[in-house]
Structures are given as C-alpha cells and as structure tokens.
Image (cartoon, coloured by chain):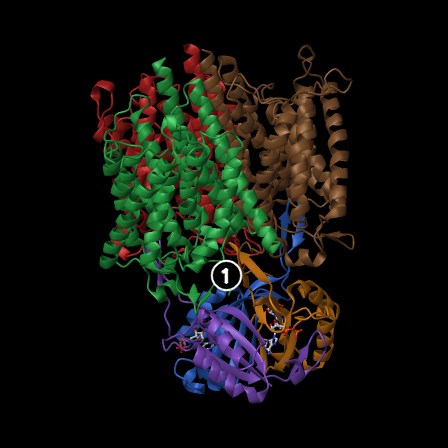
Chain colours: A green, B brown, C red, D orange, E blue, F purple
Amino acid sequence: MADFAYVIDTFFTLFAMVLIIFMVPGFAMLEAGLVRTKNVTAVLTVNTMIYAVASMAFLLIGYSWAFGSWENSSMSMWAAFMFQMAFVGKTINIMSGGVSERVRMMPLAVFAVIMGALIYPTVVNISWGANMLEGTFLALSMYDLAGSTVIHSTGGWALLAAILIIGSRKGRYMNGKIRVIPASNIPLVVLGAFLLWIGWFGFNGGSVGSISSKESADAVALTIMNTNTAGLAGAIIAGSLMYIRYKLFDITMILNGALGGLVAVTAGPDLYDIYTPILIGAIGGTLVVFAVPIFDKLRLDDPVGALSVHLVNGIWGTLAVGIFASNPAEGITLMGQLKGIVVVAAFVFPVSFIVIFIINKIVRFRAEENVQLEGMDVNECGVEAYPEFKRAI
Amino acid sequence: MADFAYVIDTFFTLFAMVLIIFMVPGFAMLEAGLVRTKNVTAVLTVNTMIYAVASMAFLLIGYSWAFGSWENSSMSMWAAFMFQMAFVGKTINIMSGGVSERVRMMPLAVFAVIMGALIYPTVVNISWGANMLEGTFLALSMYDLAGSTVIHSTGGWALLAAILIIGSRKGRYMNGKIRVIPASNIPLVVLGAFLLWIGWFGFNGGSVGSISSKESADAVALTIMNTNTAGLAGAIIAGSLMYIRYKLFDITMILNGALGGLVAVTAGPDLYDIYTPILIGAIGGTLVVFAVPIFDKLRLDDPVGALSVHLVNGIWGTLAVGIFASNPAEGITLMGQLKGIVVVAAFVFPVSFIVIFIINKIVRFRAEENVQLEGMDVNECGVEAYPEFKRAI
Amino acid sequence: MADFAYVIDTFFTLFAMVLIIFMVPGFAMLEAGLVRTKNVTAVLTVNTMIYAVASMAFLLIGYSWAFGSWENSSMSMWAAFMFQMAFVGKTINIMSGGVSERVRMMPLAVFAVIMGALIYPTVVNISWGANMLEGTFLALSMYDLAGSTVIHSTGGWALLAAILIIGSRKGRYMNGKIRVIPASNIPLVVLGAFLLWIGWFGFNGGSVGSISSKESADAVALTIMNTNTAGLAGAIIAGSLMYIRYKLFDITMILNGALGGLVAVTAGPDLYDIYTPILIGAIGGTLVVFAVPIFDKLRLDDPVGALSVHLVNGIWGTLAVGIFASNPAEGITLMGQLKGIVVVAAFVFPVSFIVIFIINKIVRFRAEENVQLEGMDVNECGVEAYPEFKRAI
Amino acid sequence: MKKIEAIIKPFKLEDVKDALAEIGITGMTVSEVKGYGRQKGHSELYRGAEYVVDFLPKVKMEMILDDDQVEEVVNTVVEAARTGKIGDGKIFISDIDQIIRIRTGETDSEAV
Amino acid sequence: MKKIEAIIKPFKLEDVKDALAEIGITGMTVSEVKGYGRQKGHSELYRGAEYVVDFLPKVKMEMILDDDQVEEVVNTVVEAARTGKIGDGKIFISDIDQIIRIRTGETDSEAV
Amino acid sequence: MKKIEAIIKPFKLEDVKDALAEIGITGMTVSEVKGYGRQKGHSELYRGAEYVVDFLPKVKMEMILDDDQVEEVVNTVVEAARTGKIGDGKIFISDIDQIIRIRTGETDSEAV
Ligand SMILES: Nc1ncnc2c1ncn2[C@@H]1O[C@H](COP(=O)(O)OP(=O)(O)O)[C@@H](O)[C@H]1O
Ligand SMILES: Nc1ncnc2c1ncn2[C@@H]1O[C@H](COP(=O)(O)OP(=O)(O)O)[C@@H](O)[C@H]1O
Ligand SMILES: Nc1ncnc2c1ncn2[C@@H]1O[C@H](COP(=O)(O)OP(=O)(O)O)[C@@H](O)[C@H]1O
C-alpha cells in the first residue's frame, strides 16, 4: 500500500501544482487589466519573465537551500519540487505588481533571481524547510499552512521596501492631491482574479501535503472548502461596504476583498470549522477596504492594491490562527504566530531593502518621467498592447 | 480498500469541482463579451456577486434543505458539499445573463439569495436529494444525471419569469422592428464558451458520483466523452445551418449551438452509446438556431441566448433520455421524464415569478431608460470596463 | 490491485486530457491576439470549427485507423480515446494559425476533416499505433514520447505546404520590403501562451500513459518537470537575445521562445536528467529567434510563427533525443530519430501538398485581395470582433 | 458652400441621421469627440476613491452643403438633437471654398 | 493660407501620405471618422439576424498649406486616393486666418 | 467669431484645460488625432523585426470664441502646451459664420 500513497500523493501534488500554475496567467491578467493601456505589455512581460527567471533560480539554487535535500519518500521528488517551484513566482509577483507602471525590467529581473535563489528560500528554510534556526531562540513555531506569512507577507514586505525606494508613479500625488488612475480592462481583472481564486484551491489544498488517507482526504477537502468560504466572505463584505458608502458596486474593490479573504484564510484553513472562515474572510475583506486609502494617504503608491491584499492580510491571517485555532498542545499559540510574523518581517524587509537599494545604485529601478509619460510598453518592450485600438483621451 | 474508494472519490470530486468553478469565469467572460461595452462591468459584477452570495446562501441554508444532512460515507463531506455548491451559481447565472443590460444589481442579489437558499435546493430536494415528495403522487422518477432539468431548465424558467416582468432592453424592439445589438468582444465570448465546455466535463463527469471502481471509471469516461461529442455536434450543425442560410460562419451562433448540445446531453451522458450524442447534440444545436429568432419574435429579449440554450435544450435533453435510453426496468420512461419536466416547471416558474414580482414591487429590477442609455456600468458600478478605449459610434 | 491501476490511470488520463483541452482556448487566444482586429473573429471561428470538425472525424474514422482497435485493458477505452482525440486538433491548429489573415474557412474545414480522419491518424499508426509499417524497412524506431515529430512537425509540414500554395498576406512583402504587421492584443497572446504551457503538462505527462506504479509516477513527474524547465529556458534565452540585440524585451518573441522550448523537449522529457532540458529548451528558443526572420526572408508568411515554433523545434526536439538520450539497448539512436523525422516528412509534406492543391482547385483557399483588405471577419463570419472599439489608423 | 459642424449627444446620432435623410441629406462625416462645457461629468469609482470624468462623449457631424440648404438643415438638426437638457450641443457654420469628389474629380455643388 | 480636408478610404492612407511626402508635404493631422454617403454599408450577422452597418470607416486628413501649394496637393491626393469605386471620398478647402507653432511661437507661413 | 484649433501633445491636455479654465474658457470640444510632422515616431518591434510608427498621437482642441478672446486664448494655449521640444503642435485660427446652441436655439455670442 505504500505504492498507493506514493502514486496518489504524486498525482494529487501534480494536480495542485497545475492549479497554482494557473495563477501565472491569473496574476498576469489581473495586473494587465489594472494598469493603463500604455503599460500593459510591460506588466505582462514582467510576469512572464518572473516566472521564467525565478523558477530557474529556484531550480538551480533555491530549492536545495530551502529544503536541504531533494529526497522525498512520500511522493515523487519531481512532483514535490514542481509544487514548491510553483510558489516562488508568487512572492515576486506580489512585489512586481505593486511597483508596476514605473518599474524598469532589468533591475527587476536581477531582484527576481535573488529573491528566487536566496531570500524566499531562506524564509522557507526557517518555516517549512530545513530550518537552520532549529535550536536557536529564533526557531519558529508559527503555523502557516500555505503561506499567509511565508508567501504573502514576504512578498508584501519586499514590495514595501521597493515602493519606498522606487517612489510613486509620476502624476499620482500632486500638490497634495491624489489622482485616481482607473483600471483599463475590467474583464481581464475579473478573469485574473478568478484564475487566482482557482489557483488558491491548489495552493492551500496541496499544502496539506497528502490526500492518501481518509484523514488527509478530509483535511484537503476541508481546506479547499474553507479557502473558498473566506473568499466568498471577503467579496461580500467589500461589496457591502462599497454599497453603503457609495451606493455603487466597485468590482475592483470586491475582487480585492475576495483576494484579501483568501490570503487571510491561508495560514490555517485546515484548522477551522466551516463557519470561522466567514469571519476571517470578512475581516480580511474589511481590512482591504480600509487599507487601500490609508496606503494612499501614506503616499505608498500601489497600483494593484498588493500591500492591502497580501501584506495586511498575510499578517491578519497568521494572527487568526493564533486567535481561532490556538492549540498549545500542538504548539500553536498566538505568541508563536506573532513571533513568526516578526521574525519573517525582520528578515525580509531589511534584506529586500538593502538588495533593492544596491541594485538601484547600479541600474535604476525607476523609469524616467518622460518614459512613464509615454508608457513602459514602448520604452521597455517595443510592443504596444493594443496598437489598433484607439486610445481615448 | 474502503479507504481507497474514499480517497479517490474525494480527490475525483474535488477535481470535478475545480473544473466546474472554471465556469464562473466562463460565464463571466461569455456574458462580458456578448453585451455592449457600457454594460460590461455590470455583467462582470453580477457574475461575481452571484457566485459569492448564492454560494454563501447555499452553505448556510440551501445544502441542508436539499440533502437533509451533510453526512457522507463515500467521500469527504466537504468535497461533496463543494461539488454541489459549484452548481448553485449556474442556475442563477443562466437567469442573470438573460436579463443583462437592463437589470439592476440590488434586487438581483436578493433573488440570488432566495434562489440559492430555497428555490434551487427545493428542486434538488425532489430530484437528487432528500426527496420530500417521496411516496406522494408527485414523486419524480426522472433520470437527470447532471441537471438538464434540475439546473438548466430551472435557470431557464426563472429567466422566463424575469424577462416577462423586467421587459426588454430599451431600443431593442421599436416600431415593430427588432434592432440587432452585436456582441462587443468576440475573444471573450470564445474564451468563456470554452471555459464552460471544459467545466462541463467536471459537471457531468463528477455527477457520476464515483470513479473508484472499474465500472464507475468507465461510466465517468463515457460520460465525459459523450458530453464532448454532443458539444461537437451542436457546433457543427449550428455552423452548417448558418452557412447554408447566410454563407457566413457566425461564431456566436456556433458557440450557442455547442452549448445547446452540451445542455441537451447533460441528462443522460452515461446512458448512451458513443453515437447517440451526435444526434442529441445536433438536434440541440438546431433547436438553438431556430429558437433564438422565435424568442425575438415573441419579444422576449435575451441578450445571451440563455432561453434557447438552457431552457429549450434542458427540456429536449430530459426528453432525449426517455427517447434514446428508456429502460422501464430501471424506472426510466419517457413519461417519467415528461413528468419531471412538468413538475419542475410547475414549481419553478410560478414561484420565481411571484418572488421576482414581489421584489420588483419593493426595489425595481429594471433600470430607468436614461440609465440604460448611459450604461449600467457608470450607474451601478461607477467603474467603466474600458475607460481608455475609444468607443466607436 | 488491477482495479487500482485501471481506476487511477483512467482518472489520470482524464485529468491530462482536460489540460490538453485548455489548449483549445489557448491556441484561440494566442492567435486572436496575434492577428489584426479585422481578422480576429475569423481566427477564433477557425479554431472552434477545427476542434469540432477534426475531433468528429477522428471519432468516426481516424481513431480506429490509427490504433486498429478501441480495446484497452489498462484504462477505460473512452478515456484513452478522449486523450488521443485531444491531440488531433493541435496538428491542424498549427497549420491554420500559420495561414491566418488570408485563408478561407470552407476549404480549411475540408482539409481539417482529411487531416483528422486520415493524414494525422496515419502518422500515429506508424509511430504510436497499429503500425502498418511493422516488418518493412520503413518501420520506425523513433522515440517520440508526446509528439515533437508526430504532432508538431506533422502540423509544421502541412503548414509549409499550405503556405506555398496559399501565398503570403496581401501587402506583407512589397517592392522587396517586408511590412511588419503587429499583434493586436497582447494580453490575449500571453493568456493563450500560458494556457498552452499548462496544456503541455497534460500533453507530455499524460503521454507517459500510466501513473499507477511508483516508477510511472516518477516518470510522469519528471516529464512534467522537464517540460516546464525547457519552457523556462526557451523564454529566458529568447528574452536575452532580444535584449542584447534591441535593448527591448519583445514579449511576442519571449513567448515564442518558450513555446519553442516546449516543443523541443516534447520528444523525450522522461529520458533526460533535470539539467539537460535547460540546454534543449535554450537551443529551442534560440532556433525560434533565428528562424522567424529567415522564414520571412524566404517570403514564407507565417503570422503566428508556427513554422519556427513547431516545425523547426519539432525536428530539433526529435534529434535531441538521439543526441542526449541515445540508448541503443532500448533501440533509441540518433539514426533512428533521423529516420523518423524523414519518413514522417516524406509522408506528410507531399500528401498535404497534394490534398491542399486539389482542394484549392475546387474551392480557393486564398481570400481575394479586397476581402483581405476589408478583413476576413466581415467577409467570412459577418461578425466583427470588436465592433464598439474605435480602430486606430 | 458651407460647412456645418454639429456637436450632439451620441445617442441622438441615429435620430438626427434619419431626420436629415428625410430632407434629402445623405452625405456626412461623423466622428467621436469629447466635450467640455456646462454639462458636468459624473463621478466614477476606483478601488474606493471617487473621481470626476469631465470630458463627456459627444458626436461631431460635419456636412458640406450648398448655401440654400443651410437653414433647413440647421433646423432639422436642432429639432432632432434637442432633449432640452444641458449638454445638447452646438452647431457651427463656416465657409468652404471648394469641394472635390475624389472618384470623379467633380467639383463644388456637383461634388456634394 | 488654406486648410485642406480630405476624407479618404482608410487603406489609402499610406499611399496618400507617401505621395504627399514626394511633393514635399510632411505636415498633416489625421483622424478616424465614419462616413455616410452613396456608398452603402455591408450587412452583418449576429446570432441569426442580419443588420446593416451604415457608417463606414474613413480617414480624414487635415493639412494647412500656403495658397500656392493647394492645387498640387489636391491633385496628388485625388490621384493617390482614387480607386474609381464609389466611396472614394471628398476634399474640402477652406480659409485659415492664422497659424501658430506652439514650440517657437512662429506664425503663418513659417509655422506650417 | 473665430474657431481655434489646437493640435497638442496628449499629456498636455489637462494643463491646457486648467489654464483655459482660469481665464474663463469653459467650452471646448476635444478629439484624438494622429499627427505627422517633423517629430519622428519611435520604432517598435515585433517578433524580431523593427518598424517605425510614423503617426504620433496628438489631441485636437476646438474652441469657438468671440473675436476679442482670441489673443488671450492663443497665448494661454501656447504657454500651457509648450514643452520646447519638437512636436509641440500647432494652432490654426479660422472664421465662423454662425453658432447655434441646440438646447435653446440661442445664436452667436450667446451660444458660445
Ligand atoms: N465654445 C465652444 N467651442 C467648442 N465646443 C463647445 C463650446 N462650447 C460647448 N462646446 C461643445 O458643446 C457641448 C455642449 O455644451 P454644454 O455647455 O455642455 O451644453 P449646451 O449645449 O447645453 O450649451 C460641449 O460638450 C462641447 O463639446
Ligand atoms: N456632404 C458631405 N459632407 C461631409 N462629408 C461628406 C459629404 N458627402 C460625402 N461625405 C463623405 O465622403 C465619403 C464618401 O462619399 P460617398 O457619397 O460614399 O462616395 P463618393 O466619394 O464616391 O462620392 C462619405 O463616406 C462621407 O464621409
Ligand atoms: N501643415 C500641417 N497641417 C496640419 N497639421 C499639421 C501640419 N504640420 C504639423 N501639423 C500637426 O502638428 C503636429 C506637430 O508638428 P511637428 O512638425 O511634429 O512639430 P512642431 O509642432 O514642433 O512644429 C503634427 O504631429 C501634426 O499633427
């Protein structure tokens, strides 16, 4: 029967991996829809290059660094690798999305290599992996099933560092006013958000690690159900808040609310009963609705709302495990969760800041003002996204 | 070996569920492509809200009402729930698509809750579920594997009720003439249709309920094959009829033909040999080609063709089981099928009509004429779908 | 335990098949994004009709011809059929994409029937199937796991024949100059390319044929990993070459590079270690970058780059097996690979040429010049792709 | 000859075209423009922030006419395009020296 | 100075531009318009219903020129834009009082 | 009355509009055009081949004004639209015979 488990878990992990890979076009479509038409090709190219470059760096360096070894007895080692590889791009996607419409590609590619080969694998090492902190006072006891902290906050902290160094888009904050820059293609935004949503089933479900026993099959199914429920709740609350405030349903906020709920549940979807995710997701969606304008007030220009969705909710989701599923017998405590959040932040934020700072000295991240005016597409890619469509004024 | 079946069927059901969830972006893209650019965001928002609201209503109320209990011994109860939950939005999507470009969101959301919590679960109850009609003279013997009647006709009857109450789009029928309102984005239509097509494999394949024995594996594979074949036949016949008539290949009709074929085969794909679905799908595609203009002559304005695809073919598909796979020994008869169609119609149509009528008295479903002129996007969502693209006259 | 293998392999094959079907919208979106707006509907319609017509022809005639019988003891015969059926459209897609923007639909549909019923099944017959050449001096010993030659070169040779007969798009080569015709919708191109990429996991992974033992589970996982790696390498090399040459990242070339890498690895992804695909994919990507302008110099007008991606890399990938995984004990030799390439070419190219030539005498493939000017959409489909969007000059 | 430029609300285009056809005007050139005037734009939403769209979509019709047709055409346009609400648009009339029909080379009145 | 407005078939734009470049005209402003005239639109199909598209895509070129260039330019445009089929378009000529080049403030002939 | 047509760089539109608002001009009609002039287009890439885009996006503003406002408006536009780089655009001034406000039927100065 060992074979049975090995076969099923390999198959299941490949299935989960495929769902996660749908997040590559998912992020690409979401971001392409959210930016202005003159920056669409650039955003798409960044998404593609990140997948290529970060995955390759993870294959060549990062994976061994994170897990110590490729060995695996419970499933095919190649399946285990592919599953983990599917994660790495996400972290960088979170960061690249938030600095789009002004970031240049070359320095970003360099950062993607470092993130994929070193920074992210280090976070994995100390949380899910080989654990080089083992035995030290820093050793983590955080429960983070599918990466509220390991993936989403990590990406979020890197993004915060990037925004601080790169600055806002030209014309975004002027004379003390905030200029709204609307999304250019709403169907792409919706398509992207749902591909992400579906990818999340693989992300969280696959993170259970096995489906080959009755218990693990239940855990996987519960995980997927709770993941979905939190997304539903995030969407509903965000839609309701917008309606109360404006009497209008702002789909970009509704989808951000859903994504916020999904991030929030990610740390412990297997630990909750089926009602708790409603609360966790609803709080996640609410946080997004309030965080978006706050970041704008702080002049942290984030065209896709990644700080609110991934950083804020990555933190909230990790805490939520401590609040709703604390279980000291198994080592799950609110303090342990908090410690995890802090240690990861204390590692990722400064390291990212320094790395971006140094790269920035060599190849500037920020595009010149006139390049931003003309658009990144023509200047970085030489390819317009919609050359035949007449641009409105 | 019980574990084997439990594990595999849980996994398989999750797989099928994921395919069905692809129908959420599927419907969204299809409808976003079919409406005018000024109504695209509204349609997308409706699709998103329906998934959120109806699924939540089903989780909190509808599922227990439909099935009596959450218990499940053959697979994880959470997987079984997720599979059923993936269905509920479809019924409402069918209805919302057909009234798009003039329907307001608030009353629609209220209807979605009632549909997801009560109307659809009642239909499931009497057909696949707890069966409160058991023992009465109304008890159904209809064979309807994946919902030609339970899903598609149900959505279609609700749509018919809605169109009767809400009326046609402004400017659609004027001075006895029918004004054609073309689709705004054909790639989205094609993308949406193929996501639906793929989703159908999960819909019908998953409805077999198990894949864990040789027989059930064969049943699943045959179901998926026959589902696909009927779609192929529907597309080919619709394309041929358009070519004969106009010497032109109208892709919107071809895709509607394919969807018509898919709906038609849905009642019994596991019962047919591999050639019968060609006939069933071809008749389904033909019905769509003729039904679309007939509904227009009846002044039933349905921008996406949902009545023709889902209602007409839901009926045809249910009858087809009685015609091609009648098996009195197993209780499958043409009369039993007919009874199922009639009982469901006699329940869904009047109940939907009354519910919509009452909601309509409180919050009007139909947008004002000048709101329709300006577009639903600006008035209901405050978000234009393509603000940077210049709109042609 | 026979049941276990039967069930799992049926399930796995259905899973792989579903991934391949995602290539239908994948090709459709890729091509719709690459052509001019006036030809988008036509391209989408062609993609849809090909899936319908060729699959139906394969069901009715081709499958039996290719494999001799439908019997299957290792998995459900319907699953085995669906998996093989998912392949057939690809061959024709490769061909239709390369002649888009000037090809008429009717003769193409006729060719699709012949390709799906006879030409492609014959290639399968002599390589993977019943093998009518067995015992003759032509009998193939080529190793081609998932069709570098059987699918991609076959499609490529047919395309070459088609281009020679149909000619280039009006205005493409004038007065000795090559006029560039840019892609009209880059997000669709990216979406399509990633749907193809994901489909490739099913294509190659499923071609292993079984996942039900430890060894086969490893083979599937390795296959999928190596497939992905070659795609990554192709993208990276194409991006780097473009940057070196133009200081710009041309996403259309990057994606073609990725697809080239994927085609190249397809013949033997299960045979390589995890580093070889980096080299194979990188060479594949490089070949695309150099082949695209060469075909243009040869006045072989190929709007989507299919010759470079599929024909050139189909050949390269098949040779690569002989170079990197030669294993005479198992009958895998460079000479055997070469023989396979030559025999398939010697069959497919002349037969396609003759078939297209004859069809062309009866119904011309090439659209009139003024039809090309006005666009295929209005003339062949009667449906504009984006009627509300103002077309730029 | 005169050129008449009329800036109207987009949804009035069909009505105006039909009304002009009835008085025998069948040549015109139309383009999409954005107008800025007394009529104020609506505000839109994006991720929770409100903003004002101040250029409104309008349609511009250009017709070249013989001088004696001007009055009738202007009256027809005014009637067909009027809703009585702010933003109905404007008509501008100016002189044209010469007209040529490209196909035939005909000029002036014959070319209209 | 004169303003020349030419309404032409869209696919003729390249030809006309090249022909004008040959006679030394390198400044112009182009926009996309829809034309309504003798040339009738084609009918399109949608889900089984036929309908007519009656506004046809055209391109409008505007050139401001010195008076003495007008004749040559008109002839060049007519020649390059003509297909001989209905719908080839029109040229309208009118007066311009004054021109200013924004970059330099130069006026009139120097600003062309 | 005069018609002022200004061809400017698209990203200057907001600035020009604001500057005009300050001197009390609140009516205008704007459209997107493509310009061809001294400013040369950039080259774009497609699957490894380079090509030149020679029509550049510009915005055309049209304002109808009383004669005495012309100078101030021209100066304002020139100032707000100037970047000093090639391609800043042009202003053309011509005569308008008559104006009608569709909503009210008012004419000429009252209709501006
Ligand atoms: N002075 C002007 N010059 C050019 N176009 C103008 C002028 N004033 C108004 N317009 C155009 O006319 C449209 C309608 O004008 P507006 O002031 O909004 O309302 P009304 O037509 O009722 O006077 C504007 O959107 C604009 O396109
Ligand atoms: N009186 C007019 N005023 C303005 N534009 C006109 C007028 N008549 C024709 N046009 C424009 O010229 C185009 C061509 O005119 P049409 O009558 O179709 O053919 P032809 O150019 O052969 O006379 C029309 O599509 C329209 O854009
Ligand atoms: N003779 C002309 N007629 C009409 N439009 C012109 C003419 N010359 C230039 N333009 C318009 O003005 C724009 C700017 O002109 P250009 O020669 O590029 O630079 P500059 O404004 O610095 O002289 C052009 O893109 C074009 O739209």
Q: Which of the image's four quarters has the N terminus of chain B? A: top left
Q: How many marks?
A: 1
- Residue A86, image x, y percentages: 35, 36
- Residue C191, image x, y percentages: 44, 44
Q: Nearer the viewer, residue D22 or C240?
A: C240
Horizontal side of C143 relative to B142 (left or right) equals left
Q: Which of the image's four quarters has the C terminus of chain B? A: bottom right
Q: Is residue B322 above or below residue B161?
A: above
- Quarter of image, ligand 1: bottom right
Horizontal side of D107 relative to D23 (left or right) equals left
Chain of the residue under the numbered disc 1 shown in the image: A
- Specify whether residue B275 is in view: yes
Residue at disc 1, secondary structure: loop
- Residue C314, image x, y percentages: 32, 35
Q: Residue at x 60, y 57 (%)?
A: B378
Mark 1 C-beta closer than 8 Å to ligand 3: no
Judging by the rendered image, the residue that carries numbered circle 1 is A390
Q: Nearer the viewer, residue B334 or A246?
A: A246
- Specify whether residue E97 is in view: no
Q: Is residue D48 above or below residue E109?
A: above
Q: Residues within 10 Å of mark 1 (few under 14, many from 20)?
A: many
- Residue C196, image x, y percentages: 41, 38
Query: Which amino acid, mark 1?
Result: Lys
Q: Residue at x 40, y 28 (%)?
A: A208
Q: Is residue C372 above or below residue C365?
A: below
Q: Nearer the viewer, residue B136 or C255?
A: B136
Horizontal side of D79 relative to B148 (left or right) equals right
Q: Nearer the viewer, residue A57 or B342?
A: A57
